[in-house]
Amino acid sequence: MSWMRRKPIDTAASSGQSSGLARTLSWPHLLALGVGAIVGTGILTLIGVGADRAGPAVLVSFAIAGAICACAALAYAELSTMLPAAGSAYSFSFALLGETIAWIVGWSLVLEYSLVVATVAVGWSGYASPLLVSLGFPPLLTTGPDAGGLVNVPAIVIIAIVAALLVFGTRESARLNSVLVVVKIATLCLFVAIALPAFDAANLDPFMPHGFAKAADPDGVERGVMAAAAIIFFAFYGFDAISTAAEEARDPDRDLAIGIVGALAACAVIYMLVAAAAIGAMPVAAFANSPEPLALILRELGQGDIARIVAVAAVISLPTVLLGFLYGQSRIFLVMARDGFLPQGLARISQRGTPARVTIATAAVVAVIAGIMPIDQIAALANAGTLIAFTAVGSCLLVARRTMPTAKRPFRAPAGPLVAIGAIAGCTYLFFSLPTNTLLFCGIWTALGVLVYLLYGRRRSILHRE
């Protein structure tokens, strides 16, 4: 049947070898790309949203989300070294699960990457806006309509700057990203050094005020440890962007696995330290609704100068997340265009070895989203797309282990079937722990994607033409 058509593994892998993209990235670049993409809005801004949903038990939410992402990361590491193509979960699905599933995964990745970039841009604006307003910038132009403003101009501008950098060149972007990642990690270490000595166990009581499972409170907000984990999950993904660099890695067999697993492991340690320091230093109600919770905690501790340093460092370093995800989305779009699912003109590579057209088009769309939508709604919907993709990757690992047991695997995930099942089960549970409205919007988005596939994608696919 046509909807089960699969792209041969050797074809999928060889297409990346002749893509025209320059192989300029080594494992330190990929590790920095992963850390830069992971550490960002999730810990710098969404920790407040998570604390509102779960109370001090947001620490458990971080642990659960991290464990599920660890399973997904191991699956990504094995599959990306088996199939080093820029399409990430989309390419894995096309080769192992069939064309229709691949389209749905690609459609979900469009949702994920677009909304992640928008979320981070809004989070960056939350730190940058107080600094800009103090310099005379109009407050109405620093927030979207939901917060009483007109349009979030800082969010739009930062997306444009990062897109221009990516169009300029991948190697140059990676070098700047590495520098900014060092700044970001140093800032979080500074926060921990100041806040952890102020740890007060009384701030952990009551530890789990909203229970474990998702449940609606009288104010209509769905809370609980798992409701928070479904939002906090946003803080951990980003390692999947590394797999989109497969066609630009100097040694994909080695570099991709180091980048994916190493980035997630480093970030898990950082996150637990920062979350523990924040929760212990102040009651969660004091920073739950702040767009800059870490800076707020420092100010309340009498560390106003350090708070300004954290705010400035966030302004400087948060764009690394934008760079990682905008980079990843442009590469996924590139592969989908190469496969015929998008206009093939978007697959053209510029003289500098970058997909300039698709990068600019992507930036234009996400800039509009960032300019008008609130951060919590964007993050929840982005998580829905990611959870679908991660579930598909877990399924791909199971299929690959069963149907290709002797295939070359430069990296082999330990306890592969258990890792795959962990990713599938964990992501499915988190998916249904998302806000009900988010599930509704995701359903509408998926239905729209299926319609586009039936009317356009199925007939445009390269496999259909062959």
Image (spheres, helix red, strand yellow):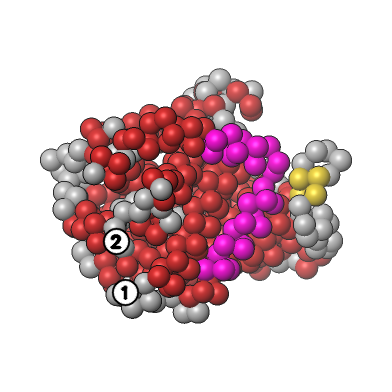
In the rendered image, which residue does mark 1 sit on? Answer: 407
Figure check: 452 above or below 42: above
Along the horizontal axis of the image, is 400 left or right of 215?
left
Query: Could you tell me the amino acid type at mark 1?
Result: Ala
In the rendered image, which residue does mark 2 sit on? Answer: 9
Of residue 329 and residue 106, the one placed in the foreground of this image is: 106
Query: Magenta segment range?
Result: 420-447
Q: Is 141 in the magenta?
A: no
Badge 2: few (under 14), some or many (20 or more) residues near its Cα, within 10 Å? some
**Residue at the location (38% across, 45% down)?**
2
Q: Residue 257, how many percent across, how many down? A: 36, 70
Q: Is 425 in the magenta?
A: yes
Of residue 447 and residue 88, the one placed in the foreground of this image is: 447
Q: Residue 164, how many percent across, how many down? A: 28, 36
User: Looking at the image, do the residues carrying marks 2 and 1 touch, with CB atoms under 8 Å apart?
Assistant: yes
Q: Residue furthest right?
A: 218
Query: Could you tell me the amino acid type at mark 2?
Result: Ile
Q: Secondary structure at mark 2?
A: helix
Q: Residue 168, how many percent across, how many down? A: 22, 41
Along the horizontal axis of the image, is 27 left or right of 89?
left
